Image: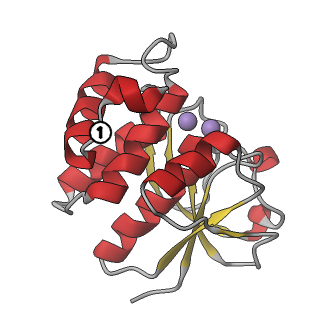
Amino acid sequence: MGNKIYVFGHQKPDTDTITSSIVLANLQRALGNDAVAYKLGNLNKETKYALKTFEVEEPQTLESVDENCDVALVDNNEFSQSVNGIEKANVKMVVDHHKIKFETIEPIFYVAEPVGCTSTIIYKLYRQNDVEIDTPIAGLMLSAIISDTLLFKSPTCTEQDKEIAQKLAKIAGVDINAYGK
Ligand code: MN
Ligand code: MN
């Protein structure tokens, strides 16, 4: 096991930022890495509801990162939206669906796709790595897709988001339209 990896999204967290942090940290642990999800601010009501529904604990708040600390960014890649100290941290990984405003010194693991939600990308990472998606993980990913795509109505929503949401709903055992409300 290497250094601890701090996994987090953007400031003023939304559901995708929080759930993607949790599910990416979980994937990293399944792959044998020491990874912990954090939040950079208070959760909104929608995100709290999602965590409560699937009985997942809120991540701890991260105030700053130390120099050379290993981090993974989800749902954003802009230092202006990130944590104090990010400029001197080691960004090892980025998983995101926004425009890219990022420069690296070393090669890193960077996954960016023009889809409606970060969790849609992370779902595929679970599949690629043959890591099981259990009920709470599926529920969190589904919550993020519903939230970011405004229940599939946003212009950023793609066929992939819709297809993956259906698969996740089956695993999570929820009715998308009922839960979406
Ligand atoms: Mn976001
Ligand atoms: Mn997002």
Identify the secondary structure beneath mark 1.
loop
- Does residue 156 appear anywhere in the picture? yes
Vertical comparison of 29 with 149: above or below: below
Looking at the picture, tell me which residue is in the foreground, 83 or 169: 169
- The location of residue 75, given as percent across then percent down, is 57, 43
Which image quadrant for residue 114? Answer: top left
Q: How many marks?
A: 1
- The location of residue 155, given as percent across then percent down, is 50, 10
Which image quadrant for residue 174? Answer: top left
Looking at the picture, tell me which residue is in the foreground, 170 or 162: 170
Q: Residue at x 76, y 69 (%)?
A: 88
Q: Residue pushed farthest bottom? A: 1
Q: Which residue is labeled 1 in the image?
A: 174
Q: Residue at x 30, y 46 (%)?
A: 123
Whether residue 42 sits left or right of residue 139 in the image: it is right
Whether residue 8 sits left or right of residue 120 in the image: it is right
The amino acid marked with disc number 1 is: Val
Whether residue 162 sits left or right of residue 101 in the image: it is left
Vertical comparison of 31 with 39: above or below: below
- The location of residue 95, given as percent across then percent down, is 48, 48
Q: Residue at x 51, y 47 (%)?
A: 50
Image quadrant in which the N terminus is located: bottom left
Vertical comparison of 158 with 89: above or below: above
For ligand 1, give the image quadrant. top right
Q: Residue at x 76, y 79 (%)?
A: 66
Looking at the picture, tell me which residue is in the foreground, 1 or 100: 1
- The location of residue 115, given as percent across then percent down, is 42, 26
| Mark 1 residue's CB less than 8 Å from ligand 2 | no
